[in-house]
Image: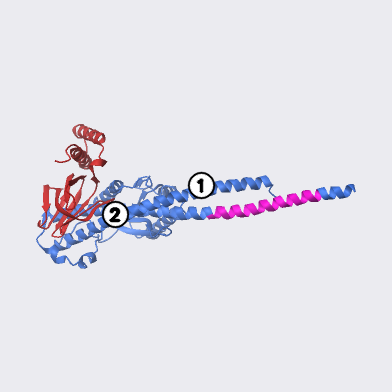
Chain colours: A red, B blue
């Protein structure tokens, strides 16, 4: 038994469902987790999360922003800030966000905190577009 | 003595009021349900994050400035959470009164007590009394989201870390049930992680095995603590919003009942007056007829 639990503060997305594989966007790079993975605790960066439920053939995916991931012999637990599914992503808005934030990063003088939040938004919008445009990738 | 027309006008206007209060009650009931779902949805996340902080902090023997209480508390930041709108019974009054009493009692004990307001009502109450807040947020009822809570939490955190305050406390309405709310005063920072949740767990051995940390445990704990704090603020906001709708629902319910009683007694007066009038008219006619005979 290898189970996935995937939560945000606002929604319960996956609770204790058996999975074959989970790919998480770790802080230091993408990590693929299969059954029998060594116990691991890592923080997640903004990116695309993928998981394959045992009961379904398709690999599911969602864009997540900051989160944390815990791997135990019994399964994987993910706590993330925000999760967007492909059908919730507004392509035009994301394109606009990318354009705006790139312009801000290039032209504006800002402190570390603003810089970080703009970067985060940019990464989220980019990941969203990637999810919509290349669903299988 | 009011004329029949006056009484009828009063009955009509009371009926209108009753319709409004009834509608408001229904709206609050719907919003309350949504707010309650919010609280329930957040719980597993909150528990998860709390237990993992305790796990890591204990097994890896990590401490963080956010978790350590300062020796002597001299500067306190009070976060006062109210609603933006009234018509919800004692909801805002209780909070404002509590905060005022707290201020009066502890003024001499601490060097400085500052205010941060969430919600228009509390803000207006204290500004009228000459308090200058260091921060103010309103428009809570429209959309409380995790994003907003994180934004507020970030501001509070910066105040604390810069050393301006030794303690951050939150005064808010705790949601007990749809009809009861209690005023709660909690210490938000320093963050207290109780170790009991850890010792009760049987997977202590499991946790102690070689874990891979990415990045270092210290860094993970720091990030998790910040998230935990965001979540506390979000929780308080959700509770306060749920409590607000609960309070408004109760207030509107009793307002509707009062209107109903009022209409009943007014209708009685109206009918009495009407009958009196008929009686006096009949007497006039009969006595007129009598006189002609």
Q: Position of residue B114 (x, y in %)?
A: 34, 52
Chain holding disc 1: B
Which numbered dot is residue B42?
A: 2
Image point (15%, 48%), residue name: A24
Quick check: is B276 in the magenta stretch?
yes
**Observer-nearest residue: B90 or B238?**
B238
For label 2, the SS is helix
What separation in Å lies between label 1 and label 2 (alpha carbons)? 33 Å
Indicate the quadrant containing the C terminus of chain A: top left, top right, bottom left or bottom right. top left
Determine the image quadrant of residue A122: top left
Q: Is residue A28 left or right of residue B142?
A: left
Q: Position of residue B153 (x, y in %)?
A: 28, 50
Q: Is residue B162 left or right of residue A31?
A: right
Q: Position of residue A79 (x, y in %)?
A: 21, 52
Quick check: is B282 in the magenta stretch?
yes
Image point (11%, 49%), residue name: A31
Q: Compared with residue B90, is residue A116 higher up or lower down, i.e. above or below?
A: above
Which numbered dot is residue B242?
A: none
Q: Which residues are magenta?
A: B257-284
Classify mark 1: residues with Cα within 10 Å, few (<14), some (14-19) or many (20+).
some
Q: Is residue A45 visible?
A: no
**Observer-nearest residue: A136 or A97?**
A136
**Which label's residue is closer to the chain start, 1 or 2?**
1
The reply to whether the C-beta atoms of the residues labelled 1 and 2 are less than 8 Å apart is no
Image point (37%, 59%), residue name: B184
- The residue tagged 1 is B20
For label 1, the SS is helix
């Amino acid at each position: 038994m290898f189970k996935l639990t995937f939560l945000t503060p606002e929604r319960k997305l996956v609770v204790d469902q058996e999975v074959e594989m989970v790919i998480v966007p770790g802080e230091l790079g993408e990590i693929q987790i299969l059954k029998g993975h060594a116990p691991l605790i890592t923080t997640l960066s903004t990116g695309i999360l993928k998981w394959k439920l045992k009961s379904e053939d398709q690999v599911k995916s969602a864009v997540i922003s900051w989160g944390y991931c815990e791997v135990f012999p019994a399964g994987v637990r993910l706590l993330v800030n925000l999760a967007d599914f492909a059908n919730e992503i507004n392509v035009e808005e994301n394109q606009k966000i990318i354009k705006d934030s790139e312009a801000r990063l290039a032209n504006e003088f800002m402190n570390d905190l603003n810089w970080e939040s703009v970067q985060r938004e940019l990464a989220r919008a980019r990941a969203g577009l990637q999810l919509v445009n290349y669903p299988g990738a | 003595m009011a004329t029949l027309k006056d009484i009828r006008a009063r009955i009509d206007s009371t009926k209108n009021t009753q319709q409004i209060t009834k509608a408001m009650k229904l709206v609050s009931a719907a919003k309350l349900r949504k707010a309650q779902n919010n609280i329930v949805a957040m719980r597993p996340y909150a528990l998860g994050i709390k237990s993992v902080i305790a796990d890591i902090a204990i097994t890896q023997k990590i401490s963080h400035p956010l978790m350590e209480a300062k020796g002597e508390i001299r500067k306190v930041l009070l976060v006062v959470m109210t609603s933006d709108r009234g018509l919800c019974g004692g909801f805002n009054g209780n909070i404002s009164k509590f905060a005022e009493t707290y201020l009066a009692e502890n003024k001499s004990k601490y060097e400085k007590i500052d205010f941060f307001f969430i919600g228009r009502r509390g803000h207006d109450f204290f500004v009228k009394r000459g308090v200058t807040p260091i921060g103010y947020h309103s428009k809570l009822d429209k959309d409380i989201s995790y994003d907003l809570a994180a934004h507020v939490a970030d501001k509070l955190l910066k105040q604390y870390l810069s050393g301006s305050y030794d303690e951050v406390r939150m005064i808010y309405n705790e949601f007990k049930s749809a009809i009861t709310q209690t005023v709660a005063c909690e210490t938000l920072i320093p963050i207290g992680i109780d170790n009991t949740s850890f010792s009760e767990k049987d997977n202590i051995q499991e946790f102690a095995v070689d874990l891979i940390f990415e990045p270092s445990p210290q860094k993970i704990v720091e990030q998790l603590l910040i998230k935990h704090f965001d979540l506390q603020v979000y929780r308080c906001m959700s509770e306060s919003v749920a409590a607000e709708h609960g309070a408004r629902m109760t207030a509107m319910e009793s307002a509707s009942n009062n209107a109903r009683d009022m209409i009943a007694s007014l209708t009685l007066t109206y009918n009495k007056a009407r009958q009196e009038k008929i009686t006096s008219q009949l007497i006039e006619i009969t006595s007129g007829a009598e006189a002609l005979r």
